[in-house]
Amino acid sequence: MSKTLYSSVTNVPNPLSITVSSSHNSSTATAQVVAPSKTVNIGDNITIDLGYVGDYNRVFKGYVKNIVRQVPDDLYTIIAKDDLVRAIDFFIVPTNPDSSYKWHNIKAEDLIHNILSLA
């Protein structure tokens, strides 16, 4: 019995290739999707699911950062960064420099959530 591959990219029908990469020395994960048409815009939220039909997982969630048209192939390369790119895009500083942001006894994921909600 053979398994059928499954891929899904939000608002990108029929992607030709999908690459998701992350690294310990990079602040964000990157996804690159090659598609025959431009169906998303810069800033759009996208998710990528990969696996087999009936057995797949979400491998990426983020925002479209760049779209490049490849000539003469007439293909589009969609480049996205994961949710942490919002912290980079929006340099977060307190409105009062004498009253900095402080958190104590907080889980890492809650801290990230709190910081990103400021963006």
Image (spheres, rainbow, N blue to C red):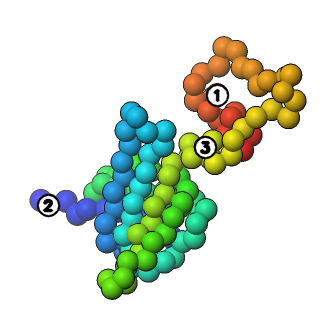
- Mark sitting on residue 88: 3
63 left or right of 75 in image: right
Instruction: Give the amino acid type for the residue marked by disc 2 in the picture.
Output: Ser
Residue type at tag 3: Ile
Q: Is residue 83 left or right of residue 117?
A: left
Locate the N terminus and report the quarter of the image it occupies. bottom left
Q: Which of 103 and 25 is in front in this view?
A: 25
Quadrant for the C terminus in the image: top right
Q: Is residue 60 above or below residue 65?
A: above
Whether the residues at callouts 1 and 3 have beta carbons within 8 Å, the answer is: no
Number of the label disc, if any, that sits on residue 111? 1
Instruction: Using residue 13 as the reference point, say whether residue 103 is left or right of it.
Output: right
**Nearest to the observer: residue 11 or residue 42:** 42
In the depicted structure, whether residue 93 falls above or below residue 9: above
Q: What residue type is labelled 1?
A: Leu
Residue 105 occupies quadrant: top right
Q: State the residue position of label 2.
A: 2
One can see residue 50 in this view: yes
Q: How crowded is mark 1: few (under 14 residues within 10 Å), some or many (20 or more)?
A: some
Q: Tag 2 or tag 3, which sits nearer the N-term? A: 2
Secondary element at image label 3: helix
Tell me the CA gap for discs 1 and 2.
43 Å
Graded by Cα atoms within 10 Å as few (under 14), some (14 to 19) or many (20 or more), the crowding at tag 3 reads few
Viewer-nearest residue: 53 or 116: 116
Residue drawn at point x = 45 percent, y = 72 percent: 68
Q: What element carries label 1?
A: helix
* Quadrant housing residue 35: bottom left
* Outermost residue, top side: 105
Residue 84: x and y in percent read: 56, 42
